[in-house]
Image (cartoon, rainbow, N blue to C red):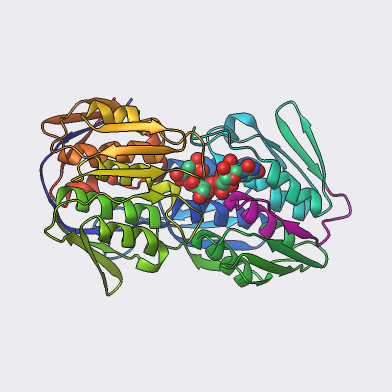
Amino acid sequence: MDRIRIRGGAPLTGSIPISGAKNAALPLMIASLLTEETLELGNVPRLADISSLLRIMSNFGVDHMIAGRRPGQTIETGQTIRLTARSVIDTCAPYELVSTMRASFWVIAPLLARFGHAKVSMPGGCAIGTRPVDLLIMALAKLGAAIEIDGGYVVATAAKGLKGAEIDFPKVTVGGTHVALMAATLAEGTTVIRNAAREPEVVDLAECLIKMGAKIQGAGTSEIVIEGVSRLGGATHEVLPDRIETGTYAMAVAMTGGDIVLENTRSELLQFALDVLGQAGADVTPTLGGIRVRRNGNGIQPVDVTTDPFPGFPTDLQAQFMALMTRAGGTSRIRETIFENRFMHVQELARLGAKIRLDGDSAYVEGVPTLKGAPVMATDLRASVSLVIGGLVAEGETTINRVYHLDRGFEALETKLARCGAEIERLRG
Ligand SMILES: CC(=O)N[C@H]1[C@@H](OP(=O)(O)OP(=O)(O)OC[C@H]2O[C@@H](n3ccc(=O)[nH]c3=O)[C@H](O)[C@@H]2O)O[C@H](CO)[C@@H](O)[C@@H]1O
Ligand SMILES: C=C(OP(=O)(O)O)C(=O)O
C-alpha cells in the first residue's frame, strides 16, 4: 500500500491549481443516466472515486470517453468525460461496486425516474457516522416509488412513472437533495423540495440539469421547485471548483507560512471558512480567477468553530481546521454537528504531539508550540489530509499510511504541494 512521507518545516510558496469538485462531479456523472443523449463534463478531477463511479456506470451499459490533458496545463489535472447512457442494460448497482462510495447510491434516482425500477446496494463511503439513507428513500417514496429493502439492497419501482410531490426534509441532506432533484426532473407535475441543501454542488447539478432541459427554480435556496418534463437531452458542463480542496490548501499555508495563490477557484464557495481563517491569522485576498493566502504576521490565533450546512463552516474542512488549531496560541473549541463520529483524526494528530480533548460533539484543541513527525494512519478522506497539514510543520519525518483515502478526493496532492516547496513524496508499494 502506498504511503506519503513528509519532512516538515518548509513554507508553501507559489501557486496551486484547484481541481474540479469531487462532490459535484459525482452527481453530475450520475445525471447522465437521465438521458439517452451525451453529457460532456469538463474539469472532472482524476480521483479514485471518479474511476469507481465510471466502473458502476459501465456496468449499467453507459459508454464513456475520456479526453486527456488540456493545452497549457503544467501538471496533469482535470479531464473531460463524455457519458452516453443510450442503451442501459442493467438497473442494478451491486454491493461490490457501491460499498466503497456513498455517492454511488444516488444512481437510484435517475434509474428509477427514467426506467421505472432500480436495485441499488446500501452505500459505503467515509466511516464518519451511521449515514442512513432513510431521507433519500422518503423522498423517492413521496414521488410515488414503491420501496423494499431486500438483502442489503434498496429496490425501488414506479411502473407508471414518478409523480411530482412536496418533499419536506426534516434535516438538511446533500444526498437527499441531489436524489430528489434528479428524480423530480422526469416526474409528472410539480415537485417542491423544502429545507433543501444549499451547497454549491447542488446548484452545479441544477445548472447542468437545466442545460439538459429540466425546469428548476430556487437551487441554492432552501426551497427548490421542479416542473417535471417528459425527457432530457445532452449538454456540456464544467464542474465547479472544489471548495474543500481550496480550503484545505488555504489552511495548509496558514499552517506553514509562505504565500500561495490558489488558482481556478472562487472565494464565495467557502466564504465562511475563509473568514474563520482570517480570524485565525491568515490574510486572504481574492485575485483574478483565484485566492491569495498568506499569514498576517500575528501567528496562529485560536478560533471556535461549529460545522453547519452551507453557507456555514463545512464539516469536510473540520479535520483540516483542527490540524491548524493544534499550533494556535491558545485553546479552540471545534463542534461537529453534521456527523456523529467525525473525530477519528484526533488520535492520529495526537501522535504528532497535538493536545486535543474530546467531549461529546466538541473537540477542545490546546495549541502547542511544536509538532513532531511520526508514523500516522489515515482513517478517512478529510482526516487523512489533516495529517498532511500536521506533517507539513512537524519536526522531522511524518509517514502517512493508507493513502488510498487521500486518493479518493485529492488530485495530485503531493505534486501540487511539492511544487510549492513542501518536502513530500509518495512511497509506492
Ligand atoms: C459525495 C458527497 O457529496 N458527500 C458529501 C455529502 O454527504 P451526504 O450527502 O452523505 O451527507 P448528508 O448531507 O446527506 O448528511 C447530513 C446529515 O444527514 C444525515 N442523513 C442523511 C441522509 C439520510 O437519509 N438520513 C440522514 O439522517 C446524515 O447522517 C448526516 O448526519 O454531504 C456531506 C455534508 O456536507 C459531506 O460531508 C460529504 O462530503
Ligand atoms: C465524506 C466525504 O465523502 P463521501 O460522502 O463520499 O464519504 C467527503 O468528501 O469528505
Q: Is residue 244 magenta?
A: no
Horizontal arrangement in the rendering, residue 121 relative to residue 262 (left or right): right
Horizontal arrangement in the rendering, residue 43 relative to residue 397 (left or right): right
Residue 91 placement: quadrant: top right
Q: Is residue 169 magenta?
A: yes
Q: Residue at x 73, y 61 (%)?
A: 184
Q: Which residues are magenta?
A: 158-181
- Closer to us: 404 or 364: 364
Q: Which residue appears farthest toward the bottom when viewing the image?
A: 288
The image shows residue 342, relative to residue 72, as above or below, that is above
Q: Position of residue 230 (x, y in %)?
A: 79, 67
Residue 294 placement: quadrant: bottom left
Query: Dividing the image into 4 quarters, which one contains the C terminus?
Result: top left
- Closer to us: 206 or 229: 206
Q: Position of residue 99 (x, y in %)?
A: 57, 32
Instruction: For residue 103, say whether it is visible.
Output: no
Query: Dividing the image into 4 quarters, which one contains the N terminus?
Result: top left
- Closer to us: 121 or 236: 121
Q: Residue at x 37, y 37 (%)?
A: 363
Q: Residue at x 73, y 36 (%)?
A: 154
Q: Position of residue 14 (x, y in %)?
A: 16, 59
The image shows residue 104, relative to residue 151, as above or below, that is below
Instruction: For residue 391, say whether it is visible.
Output: yes
Horizontal arrangement in the rendering, residue 346 relative to residue 81 (left or right): left
Q: Residue at x 37, y 44 (%)?
A: 334
The image shows residue 348, relative to residue 174, as above or below, that is above
